[in-house]
Image: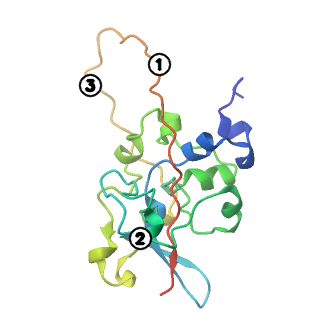
Amino acid sequence: MLANPPFWKRKTLDEMSRAEWESLCDGCGRCCLHKLRHEDDNTLSFTNVACRLLDHQTCQCSKYANRRRYVPDCVQLTPEALHEIDWLPPSCGYRRVAEGRDLAWWHPLVSGDPETVHTAGVSVRGRAISEKVAGALEEHIVDWPGRNARGRRPAPLSPAPLSPAPLSPAPHCPPRMCRPARRIVEP
Ligand code: SF4
Ligand code: SF4
């Protein structure tokens, strides 16, 4: 065991500071995809259709501060809300910590780089379609947001350097606003 484990291993969600809580978001954008709940058995289907406010390159909300003016049912994630929500993707940092799992290697808090969630192929970059052009959600049901993402690790650099580069401090990962999850859309 680490002598000084990171905050997400030693604190409960309720004990985290605001900045710590916000930094649990990996910036994947998966929660901004529409979901369908099946009325017969209450199960969920994920789609690749993104909220109209999602920036598909950064995978961030393009109007975060005023988003509820445009998307009134955008949900704010809180420790309390996590107990009620069953639609966060399994890869989500909040869900992983709530379930007692560690953050993945591509999480910015682990990698020190906010781009790894994209380069690992975990974010929605390049594989979501805006609700503004998607049409019927039923035609966009996909399973990848509901799977536990493992992430593509980058290939090792080649050729290897003759002498190791001097060590430098890991880049500081700025606190993020937690991304509210998208509303559930009934079919
Ligand atoms: S709240 Fe979870 S699913 Fe949404 S962007 Fe952050 S880590 Fe991804
Ligand atoms: S945070 Fe809410 S309003 Fe913004 S893109 Fe995601 S679902 Fe849409």
> Which residue, given by chain and number where applicable, does mark 3 sit on?
158
**158 to 64, vertically: above or below:** above
What's the CA distance linking mark 3 and mark 2?
Answer: 48 Å
Q: Nearer the viewer, mark 3 or mark 1?
A: 1
Mark 2 vs mark 1: which is more N-terminal?
Answer: 2
Q: In this view, does 8 lie to the left or right of 30?
A: right
Q: Which residue is drawn at 44% across and 73% down?
A: 34
Percent position of residue 169, x then y: 47, 18
Q: Mark 2 points at which residue?
A: 70
| Quadrant of the frame with the N terminus | top right
Real-space CA distance between mark 3 and mark 1, rounded to the nearest whole angstrom? 23 Å
Vertical placement of 180 versus 115: above or below? below
Residue 173 x %, y %: 48, 34
Q: Coloured how? A: rainbow
Secondary structure of residue under mark 1 = loop
SS label for mark 3: loop
Q: Mark 1 points at which residue?
A: 169
Three-letter amino acid code of the residue under disc 1: Pro
Categorize mark 3 by other alpha carbons within 10 Å: few (<14), some (14-19), many (20+): few
In the figure, is residue 100 to the left or right of 184?
right
Q: How crowded is mark 2: few (under 14 residues within 10 Å), some or many (20 or more)?
A: few
- Residue shown at 45% from the left, 56% from the top: 65
- Res. 131 visible in picture: yes
Residue 130, image x and y in percent? 31, 70
**Percent of width and height locating residue 24:** 57, 46
